[in-house]
Image (cartoon, helix red, strand yellow):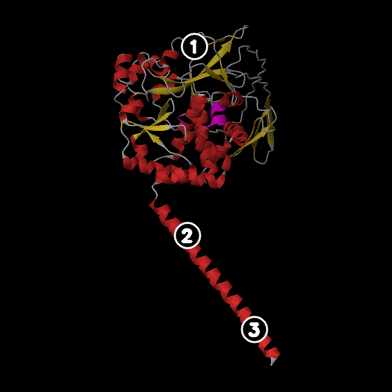
Amino acid sequence: MNWFIILFCILSICLYLITKYYLVNSDYKELKNTEQIEYFEIEQNRTSKEKLMFHHSITIHYLNKNESAKLVKINSEYMQNMNQANLSARNCLSINELYEKYKTAFDTITEEEKERTDEFILNLLNNIKRFNTHYYNYVSKWLKQISFAKGKYWLESGMPHTLENTIIMDANWFTEPRKTTLLHELTHIHQRNVEFDFEDLYQELGYYYTQNYIKGLEVILPLNRNNPDGLSKNWLWKMPQLNNTTNTTNTTNTTNTTNTTNTTNTTNTNNTTNNNKNNTTNTTNTTNTTNNNKNNKNTTNNNTTNNNTTNNNTTNNNTTNKYTTNNNTTNKYTNNTDIFNSNNNYWWIGAVFKSVNPNSLFDTDLLALKLDRDKDGNFYYLKQQPTLLNNLKSFIIFFGENLNNYHPNEMTAKFAEFYLLDILSDKNRNYDNYEGYKVYKKYFENMIKKYY
């Protein structure tokens, strides 16, 4: 009898504990579900602006048309660079006329457009954070330092650009925001604020800044299109000497196939037909020494050796041209098809108006001018026929062909677009084929891992 009572007590205690456990667990789950429901409801009731602040500590600043007008300063370098050709392209006769016109060039961003932009940036940051924390920190930092303005359709022919720390977008962008355009313009803000971050990169990409006057460009420079995101006209380019194991381009051309392989400081072109029965090897050894430091006052003369050979078998390796060129333009400029013709030369590159009185900012050609150098290291231009940039094959193969490859600021901002797509796992990438992008990607990733 006593054992029965003891067993009954033990079973009762166990039953109580089990019941208590399940009741407590049920209460916890119910409380947890209630909290989640409340959190979900609170989150749903937040605006995109509030979500940006709560999740990313970011508040996007939007300028109205009066605040935006204050960005236009008549004494700024950008306005003072407006010569006859640049004024004509903007349908003005004087800087004062342009100044008064540009002060009216902005519209106020509507509340609906602000909400749409906040939501777009929120989703973009959420996606970036999933893939790369350093890159997320980088984008977040610069978003905290910028503001947005909305330009009228005719401002800079509708092209997005930046002034000070403000990104001026076209009206369509606020209706359908474009993520690559945002990163492009965000890069220009970075370039303007911390030039030092890009100096070594520009050098690795083959760019060289000269502070000296270049004889022979007296006619060309006044026709160069004025760009607020790339004001300097003194950047030169030369095929860089890469410092890694994939330094220069080794191109093997086989029937119906063009393969590009990189080896150390050597360019070998082997043309092979039908299982390599007839094999002719042409080797061009080029030693390039590039000094692209903008702040370097001491220039170093480069010794170069250029041995050109002629191949009977050639394979056309054409890059799709995004621009339509009329017959007059084709006849006007040289058709430079030698892939590595620039290895021993510096080139001045720019977006050059076709006349002294252009009708629009798009009335330009992207040109490359081969420069020579005297015994003192000074550059000069002998006024040979300019080369259309898309015909400078060494440049196009290295950088790729696009509307923004005429200035180092624009080129790296374009690579910033590629990197964003790269991070978000773009499936239609072709930029991985460009050595220039590979250099940019390695440099940029090292920078954000170190500082962000």
> Are circles 2 and 3 on residues that touch, CB within 8 Å?
no
Residue 35: which numbered mark, if any? 2
User: From this viewpoint, which residue is outermost toward the bottom?
Assistant: 1
Q: Earlier in the sequence, mark 3 or mark 1?
A: 3
Residue marked by disc 1: 383
Residue at 66% x, 17% y is 304
Give coordinates of residue 356: x percent, y percent.
36, 14
Secondary structure predominantly adopted by residues drawn in magenta: helix
Near mark 1 (Cα within 10 A), the count class, few <14, some 14-19 or many ≥20, is: some
The local secondary structure at tag 2 comes to helix
CA–CA distance in space, label 2 to label 3: 38 Å
Q: For the residues carrying marks 3 and 1, which lies nearer the camera in this image?
A: 3
Amino acid on which disc 1 is placed = Lys
| Range of residues picked out in magenta | 393-403
Question: In the rendered image, which quarter is residue 432 located in?
Answer: top right
The residue that mark 3 highlights is 9
Q: Amino acid at mark 2?
A: Glu
